[in-house]
Amino acid sequence: MKKLPLLFLSLILLFACKQANKQIDEQQLLGTWETIEGFDFEEISFEIDEAENRTVNLVFGQKANLGSWLIAEGNLVIQGPYDTLFFTEVTFSADTLILKQKNEAYSIFYRKTEEQCNSISMLNSLRDISKRDFSEIQDTILEDGTEANYISFNIEVKDDFTVMGNALKPLVDELPNIGFELDNELITEIQTGYFYKNYRLIVTNEYLAPLSDTNNGNDDTSGIYRVIVICYCQQAE
Protein backbone atom coordinates (compact mmCIF):
# COMPACT_ATOMS: atom_id res chain seq x y z
CA MET A 1 0.00 0.00 0.00
CA LYS A 2 1.34 3.39 -0.98
CA LYS A 3 1.71 6.19 1.56
CA LEU A 4 0.95 9.83 0.85
CA PRO A 5 2.96 12.76 2.16
CA LEU A 6 1.13 14.32 5.09
CA LEU A 7 0.73 17.73 3.38
CA PHE A 8 -0.69 16.19 0.21
CA LEU A 9 -3.04 14.02 2.25
CA SER A 10 -4.29 17.05 4.16
CA LEU A 11 -5.02 18.95 0.94
CA ILE A 12 -6.99 16.02 -0.48
CA LEU A 13 -9.06 15.69 2.69
CA LEU A 14 -9.72 19.43 2.74
CA PHE A 15 -11.02 19.23 -0.83
CA ALA A 16 -13.14 16.23 0.15
CA CYS A 17 -14.80 18.19 2.95
CA LYS A 18 -15.76 20.96 0.53
CA GLN A 19 -17.29 18.47 -1.94
CA ALA A 20 -18.95 16.16 0.57
CA ASN A 21 -22.56 17.07 -0.20
CA LYS A 22 -22.36 16.37 -3.93
CA GLN A 23 -24.51 13.53 -5.30
CA ILE A 24 -22.55 10.31 -5.89
CA ASP A 25 -21.80 9.72 -9.57
CA GLU A 26 -22.06 5.96 -10.17
CA GLN A 27 -20.41 6.10 -13.59
CA GLN A 28 -17.43 7.95 -12.16
CA LEU A 29 -17.12 5.29 -9.48
CA LEU A 30 -16.84 2.40 -11.98
CA GLY A 31 -13.45 0.83 -12.63
CA THR A 32 -10.51 -0.31 -10.51
CA TRP A 33 -9.03 1.76 -7.70
CA GLU A 34 -5.72 1.15 -5.94
CA THR A 35 -5.61 1.80 -2.20
CA ILE A 36 -3.07 4.41 -1.13
CA GLU A 37 -4.35 5.13 2.38
CA GLY A 38 -6.69 3.56 4.92
CA PHE A 39 -8.51 0.68 3.21
CA ASP A 40 -7.84 -2.94 4.24
CA PHE A 41 -7.73 -4.25 0.66
CA GLU A 42 -5.11 -3.39 -1.96
CA GLU A 43 -7.62 -2.79 -4.76
CA ILE A 44 -11.33 -2.31 -5.20
CA SER A 45 -13.28 -2.58 -8.47
CA PHE A 46 -16.84 -1.39 -9.08
CA GLU A 47 -18.87 -2.83 -11.95
CA ILE A 48 -22.43 -2.73 -13.33
CA ASP A 49 -23.45 -5.49 -15.74
CA GLU A 50 -26.15 -5.49 -18.43
CA ALA A 51 -28.72 -6.70 -15.90
CA GLU A 52 -27.89 -3.71 -13.65
CA ASN A 53 -26.25 -5.97 -11.06
CA ARG A 54 -23.66 -4.03 -9.09
CA THR A 55 -20.62 -6.10 -8.18
CA VAL A 56 -17.49 -5.18 -6.26
CA ASN A 57 -14.17 -7.01 -6.34
CA LEU A 58 -11.95 -6.62 -3.28
CA VAL A 59 -8.36 -7.73 -3.92
CA PHE A 60 -5.65 -8.53 -1.40
CA GLY A 61 -2.53 -10.22 -2.80
CA GLN A 62 -3.64 -12.97 -5.19
CA LYS A 63 -7.04 -13.33 -3.53
CA ALA A 64 -10.16 -11.74 -4.98
CA ASN A 65 -13.31 -11.39 -2.86
CA LEU A 66 -16.55 -10.72 -4.68
CA GLY A 67 -19.40 -8.72 -3.22
CA SER A 68 -22.00 -6.13 -4.16
CA TRP A 69 -22.47 -2.39 -3.81
CA LEU A 70 -25.25 0.18 -3.96
CA ILE A 71 -26.03 3.82 -3.32
CA ALA A 72 -28.62 4.17 -0.56
CA GLU A 73 -29.75 7.46 0.98
CA GLY A 74 -26.57 9.18 -0.16
CA ASN A 75 -24.32 6.46 1.27
CA LEU A 76 -22.09 4.03 -0.57
CA VAL A 77 -22.79 0.54 0.81
CA ILE A 78 -20.34 -2.29 0.08
CA GLN A 79 -21.46 -5.80 0.95
CA GLY A 80 -18.25 -7.83 1.19
CA PRO A 81 -17.73 -11.53 1.91
CA TYR A 82 -17.38 -10.93 5.65
CA ASP A 83 -19.11 -7.66 6.55
CA THR A 84 -20.89 -4.58 5.23
CA LEU A 85 -19.14 -1.22 4.89
CA PHE A 86 -20.96 2.13 4.93
CA PHE A 87 -19.32 5.22 3.46
CA THR A 88 -21.15 8.46 4.21
CA GLU A 89 -19.09 10.58 1.82
CA VAL A 90 -17.75 9.81 -1.65
CA THR A 91 -15.49 12.39 -3.29
CA PHE A 92 -13.59 12.48 -6.57
CA SER A 93 -10.57 14.66 -7.22
CA ALA A 94 -9.05 14.04 -10.67
CA ASP A 95 -7.98 10.36 -10.53
CA THR A 96 -8.34 10.18 -6.75
CA LEU A 97 -11.28 8.67 -4.84
CA ILE A 98 -11.89 9.54 -1.18
CA LEU A 99 -14.31 7.52 0.97
CA LYS A 100 -15.34 8.55 4.47
CA GLN A 101 -17.01 6.33 7.07
CA LYS A 102 -19.25 7.33 9.95
CA ASN A 103 -16.36 7.04 12.38
CA GLU A 104 -14.53 9.79 10.42
CA ALA A 105 -12.04 7.26 9.00
CA TYR A 106 -10.90 8.12 5.48
CA SER A 107 -9.79 5.76 2.72
CA ILE A 108 -8.04 7.17 -0.34
CA PHE A 109 -7.63 5.47 -3.71
CA TYR A 110 -6.00 6.21 -7.05
CA ARG A 111 -7.61 5.08 -10.29
CA LYS A 112 -5.72 2.12 -11.72
CA THR A 113 -5.18 1.99 -15.45
CA GLU A 114 -5.91 -1.30 -17.19
CA GLU A 115 -2.89 -3.55 -17.49
CA GLN A 116 -2.06 -4.72 -20.98
CA CYS A 117 -3.18 -8.29 -21.63
CA ASN A 118 -0.17 -10.62 -21.76
CA SER A 119 -1.03 -14.29 -22.32
CA ILE A 120 2.55 -15.48 -21.77
CA SER A 121 2.74 -13.77 -18.36
CA MET A 122 -0.65 -15.22 -17.38
CA LEU A 123 0.40 -18.76 -18.36
CA ASN A 124 3.58 -18.39 -16.33
CA SER A 125 1.48 -17.45 -13.30
CA LEU A 126 -0.90 -20.37 -13.86
CA ARG A 127 1.97 -22.80 -14.26
CA ASP A 128 3.43 -21.63 -10.92
CA ILE A 129 0.20 -22.36 -9.03
CA SER A 130 -0.73 -25.56 -10.89
CA LYS A 131 1.65 -27.92 -9.04
CA ARG A 132 2.12 -29.71 -12.40
CA ASP A 133 5.17 -30.12 -14.59
CA PHE A 134 3.82 -28.23 -17.60
CA SER A 135 5.69 -27.85 -20.86
CA GLU A 136 7.35 -24.65 -21.93
CA ILE A 137 5.00 -22.03 -23.37
CA GLN A 138 4.27 -22.59 -27.05
CA ASP A 139 2.66 -20.45 -29.77
CA THR A 140 -0.47 -21.54 -31.63
CA ILE A 141 -3.20 -20.15 -33.87
CA LEU A 142 -6.85 -20.94 -33.13
CA GLU A 143 -9.37 -21.95 -35.81
CA ASP A 144 -10.62 -18.37 -36.17
CA GLY A 145 -7.07 -17.08 -36.72
CA THR A 146 -6.54 -15.76 -33.20
CA GLU A 147 -2.95 -15.92 -31.99
CA ALA A 148 -2.63 -17.73 -28.68
CA ASN A 149 -0.17 -19.44 -26.34
CA TYR A 150 -0.46 -22.71 -24.49
CA ILE A 151 1.13 -25.05 -21.96
CA SER A 152 0.51 -28.80 -21.70
CA PHE A 153 1.36 -32.04 -19.95
CA ASN A 154 0.79 -35.71 -20.74
CA ILE A 155 -1.17 -38.05 -18.48
CA GLU A 156 -2.12 -41.73 -18.51
CA VAL A 157 -5.84 -42.52 -18.24
CA LYS A 158 -6.62 -46.17 -17.50
CA ASP A 159 -10.27 -46.57 -16.57
CA ASP A 160 -11.31 -43.31 -14.91
CA PHE A 161 -11.26 -39.83 -16.44
CA THR A 162 -11.36 -38.20 -13.01
CA VAL A 163 -7.58 -38.62 -12.85
CA MET A 164 -7.40 -35.81 -15.41
CA GLY A 165 -9.68 -33.55 -13.38
CA ASN A 166 -7.71 -34.24 -10.22
CA ALA A 167 -4.49 -33.32 -11.99
CA LEU A 168 -5.95 -29.94 -12.96
CA LYS A 169 -7.72 -29.26 -9.64
CA PRO A 170 -5.03 -27.04 -8.02
CA LEU A 171 -5.03 -24.78 -11.09
CA VAL A 172 -8.81 -24.70 -11.60
CA ASP A 173 -9.45 -24.01 -7.90
CA GLU A 174 -7.24 -20.91 -8.07
CA LEU A 175 -8.87 -19.40 -11.18
CA PRO A 176 -11.71 -17.64 -9.26
CA ASN A 177 -9.14 -16.15 -6.86
CA ILE A 178 -7.39 -14.55 -9.82
CA GLY A 179 -10.71 -13.29 -11.18
CA PHE A 180 -11.56 -15.86 -13.86
CA GLU A 181 -15.19 -16.86 -14.44
CA LEU A 182 -16.72 -19.56 -16.62
CA ASP A 183 -17.26 -18.42 -20.22
CA ASN A 184 -20.28 -20.21 -21.68
CA GLU A 185 -19.28 -19.21 -25.21
CA LEU A 186 -16.07 -21.22 -24.89
CA ILE A 187 -17.53 -24.33 -23.25
CA THR A 188 -18.01 -27.41 -25.46
CA GLU A 189 -18.07 -31.18 -24.97
CA ILE A 190 -14.26 -31.32 -25.08
CA GLN A 191 -13.20 -28.07 -23.45
CA THR A 192 -13.93 -25.61 -20.65
CA GLY A 193 -13.54 -21.86 -21.08
CA TYR A 194 -12.93 -18.96 -18.71
CA PHE A 195 -12.68 -15.18 -18.98
CA TYR A 196 -11.04 -12.45 -16.91
CA LYS A 197 -10.94 -8.91 -18.27
CA ASN A 198 -9.46 -9.36 -21.79
CA TYR A 199 -8.02 -12.79 -20.99
CA ARG A 200 -9.60 -15.94 -22.42
CA LEU A 201 -8.60 -19.36 -21.14
CA ILE A 202 -9.39 -22.75 -22.69
CA VAL A 203 -8.73 -26.04 -20.90
CA THR A 204 -8.94 -29.07 -23.19
CA ASN A 205 -7.31 -32.41 -23.95
CA GLU A 206 -6.45 -34.66 -26.87
CA TYR A 207 -5.81 -38.37 -27.26
CA LEU A 208 -2.21 -39.20 -28.11
CA ALA A 209 -1.70 -42.97 -27.99
CA PRO A 210 -2.92 -46.23 -26.43
CA LEU A 211 -1.42 -47.48 -23.20
CA SER A 212 1.34 -50.05 -23.46
CA ASP A 213 -0.59 -52.16 -20.94
CA THR A 214 -2.82 -54.45 -23.01
CA ASN A 215 -4.98 -55.56 -20.07
CA ASN A 216 -7.49 -52.72 -20.54
CA GLY A 217 -9.63 -54.76 -22.95
CA ASN A 218 -12.05 -52.72 -25.00
CA ASP A 219 -11.99 -49.66 -22.72
CA ASP A 220 -12.31 -46.74 -25.16
CA THR A 221 -11.31 -44.15 -22.55
CA SER A 222 -7.90 -45.54 -21.68
CA GLY A 223 -4.81 -44.07 -23.28
CA ILE A 224 -2.22 -41.34 -23.06
CA TYR A 225 -3.72 -37.86 -23.26
CA ARG A 226 -2.28 -34.41 -23.56
CA VAL A 227 -3.91 -31.79 -21.29
CA ILE A 228 -3.71 -28.32 -22.82
CA VAL A 229 -4.24 -24.88 -21.26
CA ILE A 230 -4.62 -22.19 -23.93
CA CYS A 231 -4.54 -18.46 -23.19
CA TYR A 232 -5.17 -15.53 -25.52
CA CYS A 233 -6.21 -11.91 -25.38
CA GLN A 234 -9.67 -10.93 -26.58
CA GLN A 235 -9.47 -7.68 -28.49
CA ALA A 236 -11.87 -5.01 -27.25
CA GLU A 237 -14.79 -4.42 -29.61
Image: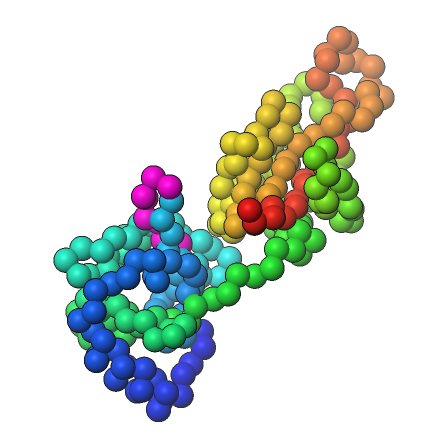
- Vertical order, 202 against 212 (above or below): below
Residue 155 visible in the snapshot: no
- Vertical order, 139 against 155 (above or below): below
What is the x, y in percent for residue 33? 41, 65
Residue 43 visible in the snapshot: yes
Check residue 170 for magenta coloring. Answer: no
**Which residue occupies 61% across, 55% down?**
117
Furthest residue toward front: 237
Name the image quarter holding residue 163: top right
What is the x, y in percent for residue 105? 24, 74
Furthest residue toward top: 218
Q: Which residue range is magenta in the image?
A: 50-58
What is the x, y in percent for residue 68? 31, 50
Name the image quarter holding residue 104: bottom left
Furthest residue toward bottom: 7
Left or right, 17 with reference to 98: left
Check residue 54 for magenta coloring. Answer: yes
- Relative depth, front residue between 46 and 164: 46
**Which residue occupies 72% across, 44% down?**
147
**Which residue occupies 20% across, 73% down?**
20
Quarter in which the N terminus is drawn: bottom left
Total number of numbered discs in the rendering? 0
Furthest residue toward left: 73
- Vertical order, 150 against 100 (above or below): above
- Vertical order, 41 against 63 (above or below): below
Left or right, 227 with reference to 186: right
Left or right, 96 with reference to 163: left
